[in-house]
Amino acid sequence: MPGAARSRARTGAHRSDLAADEHGEFHVDRVSGDEPLLPARVHRPADLLRLLLGMAGIALVLGLTTFAQGTTQGLESDIGSGAKATPQLLITLAGLTSSVAVLIVPVAFAVERLIKRDGLRIADGVLAAVLAHGVSLATDLWVADAAPASIRDALTQTLDNGSLTAPVHSYLAPVIAYMTAVGMYRRPRWRVAMWCVLLLDAFAVLVGRYTTPFAIITTVLIGWTVAYGTLYAVGSPNVRPTGQNLLAGLRRVGFRPVSALRAEDIGPDHPEHTDRGRRYLVTLEDGPPIDVTVVDREQQAQGFFYRVWRRLSLRGINQRRSLQSLRQALEQEALLAYAAIAAGANAPKLIATSELGPDAVMLVYEHIDGRSFDALADEEITDTLMHSAWRQVEALQSRRIAHRRLVGDALLVDRSGNIVLTELRGGEIAAGDLVLRMDIAQLLATCGLRVRAERAVAAAVEVLGPDAVADSLPLLQPIALSRTTRATLRHLARERSQRERDAVLAAAQAAKEAREAREAGGTKDRKTLRAERHAEKNAEKRALDEASEEAREEDLLAQIRRQVLHIRPTAVVQPAKLERLSPRILISWIAGAFAAYLLLTQLTHVNLGDVVSKAGWVWVLVAMFFSALTYIAAAMSLLGFVTERVSFVRTVIAQIAGNFVKLVAPAAIGGVALNTRFLQRAGVRPGLAVASVGASQLFGLGSHILLLLVFGYVTGTQEQTASISPSRTVIAGLLTVAVLVLVVTAVPALRNFVSRRVRSLFAGVVPRMLDILQRPGKLVTGIGGMLLLTAANVMCLDASIRAFGGGDKITYAGIAVAFLAGNALGSAAPTPGGVGAVEGALITGLTLAGLDAGTAFPAVLLFRLLVFWLPALPGWLAFNYLTRKGEI
């Protein structure tokens, strides 16, 4: 066997004691299952999870000591009262016994491990103990020197001589870390002995008034956390069974194996699935070959965090338990294998199961020779083959069995051309209607990716009937499909977008070349030339729209829906609400917490009582009116560059939501992304949505610069602002930008890269601007909205200044320059919403324009409170509202 020979040459793991039988045939205990060589250490996700839980526990304890001082003091008082009633002899005896045993038990366990040649575990334990000791000392120093008084009181106890006890027991934390790292908890006798010693020690120090309960809890958590952090960092010893262990296990259950070949060594038609277990093809002396799957703890833990996320994010769908014992995993797979065959489906027959030591199990199946569905060429996937696949699903669903992973590598095509269902481990018995319909949707997508939507739907309808297929349409959405199918759909979507962009760019280039050729043909009078250019621009726009339409393709799921609707026009296509928690919702909650933190930190530095008592409330109400007017103006400035019909009210709500986005992201990024997403969800095509927002931004930038120059000129003619000179920081920034532009222009690779990016991003901006120029009403709305937005902000700042009696000390031109400069710095600043940069620029600008600092500071605070901080809550509500409605 050439494959086996190559494997033997790589590892030398095969036996060389060959012996010929009476027929002259050689039998050799060959194992290529050790290919590739197993790593000596593995990094378990469970260790990382325990590390994070330990850190969270420490933070929780410290938070409890900070916010529940009465509880901690009461607990210490109760323990002190009980200690007075405890005989001193008992306290002394417990302390002496625990002090000796806490050292003897770990040393005895280390000696036992060394005798059994397991020194690596002891080395891991010693390393964890050293690190835990260092963390304990660092914690002691922090509590003594820098920790809040509440934490110091909760973790320390005052002794009779006036000194304080140690916040963390530097000898106990290393012992706990050592005990955890060496795995004493896996051996019942040692575990009981160690915890008895630790509890005895805790009793002695608590009753003896040498520590506090929270200090004991913190010590245990530090030892536990450091141990699992060490194990995850350096890795745990790999206890996965090798191929030789597999052969020995097969002999114990009555088989006579000759050789075992790992699945990936057979060929590309048998891919290995690391989350499913290691697969072997085992040759027997007295029978046909068998398939063996070995599942160990490390492989079982793979995909843990993904399964946890799916369990949290999906509603109404039972997910496989994130943490299963090996016994539970074995029983679940065996039950599904027997149930599938009993239902009449083609599935590998399970003929034996067994444990391979304490950390692995094996499942033995009858071998079925064949190829996976993914390994077939497109022309080999016939309607008969798809009918066979759908009949297997029909058999499972007749007994309420869900497969949960009907992807190409779970469909095996045997030599007779029938489908055999594999990968039953993640299935479900007594499944609900929702999960059964998900199986139909998944197989529709799997077949559609290979043979197009029309054939996939036709095969499903012929076997299951139109009603069953139509009922699955609400589940035909990416969130309900498998991970590999979603990745494939995303890849196809990127390819479609790239083809559409290439078509638009090609059409634009062709139109440009045609225009240049016509212009080079001869000279014409100005009027004729103007008319021809106008006609050429219209023709160029039509050509770009036509190229975009021709290059546009439906995605696979939309094609499947359309095919089903041809058969059942009344079918429900509205996607079912499966997501309980999406990444966007999670980010919005985290961002809301961050925004609240920023607001509180800003307000803690201001005496709000003085500000409120000095403010003129009539002008505060006027400022609030102009602040609310900015959202209407922002909606006008956006819709003025959108030719499609978009709801004005929803656009205003989106601008309010944009205020929340700016609170957690740089202002120049968050607003653009939100508006683009809003327009796309409102029905504007992606390219046109980007073009509309880009055109709005370009016009906004031009108007901003123009207004800044105009008002800057006006204020420059006034005496009080004649001394204003350009900022050195601004000059340095402009010089830096100029140098970067020169570098990009000079390097051909960078120049081509930037040119391609800009062309692809703004391919539709110029046609969109030309389209807007031909609609005076839209142009007036867009530019009017921009001017109104600037005017409303300036009037809001003016009303804020008048609220503190500074209206007669500064002109409107000075206020406008201060606002425009502050807004520009806020857009360029990397902080969320330009926090810090905007306030500093506004106060500086108003002060230089003639307003005293005592008035400028509260005025700017009021202005930012009305236009940035207070709208954060309505913005968060608007953001979540639009998210629930699918508008962003």
Image (cartoon, rainbow, N blue to C red):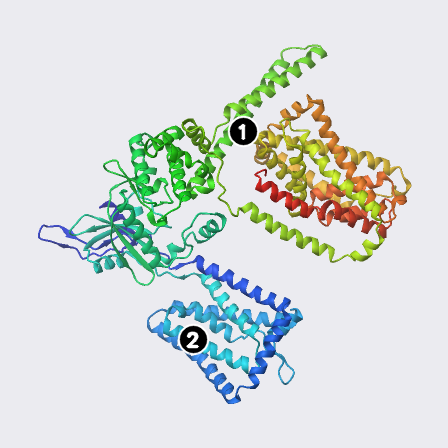
Q: Secondary structure at mark 2?
A: helix
Q: Position of residue 10 (x, y in %)?
A: 30, 51
CB atoms of marks 2 and 1 within 8 Å: no
N-term-proximal mark, 2 vs 1: 2
Task: Mark 2 vs mark 1: give the one in front.
Answer: 2
Q: Examine the image and state in which quarter residue 413 appears.
A: top left
Amino acid type, residue under disc 2 in the picture: Met
Q: Examine the image and state in which quarter residue 562 appears.
A: top left
Q: CA distance from mark 2 to mark 1?
A: 67 Å
* In the rendered image, the vertical position of residue 524 relative to residue 38, given as above or below: above
Q: Residues within 10 Å of mark 2 (few under 14, many from 20)?
A: many
Q: Is residue 726 visible?
A: no
Q: Examine the image and state in which quarter residue 443 appears.
A: top left
Q: Residue at x 58, y 16 (%)?
A: 514
Q: Which mark is residue 555?
A: none
Q: Secondary structure at mark 1?
A: helix
| Front residue of this view, candidates 14 and 848 | 848
Q: Position of residue 697 (x, y in %)?
A: 68, 34
| Front residue of this view, candidates 632 and 115 | 632
Q: Which residue is mark 2?
A: 194
Amino acid type, residue under disc 1 in the picture: Arg
Q: Is residue 656 left or right of residue 169?
A: right
Q: Position of residue 73 (x, y in %)?
A: 62, 75
Q: Which residue is mark 1?
A: 501
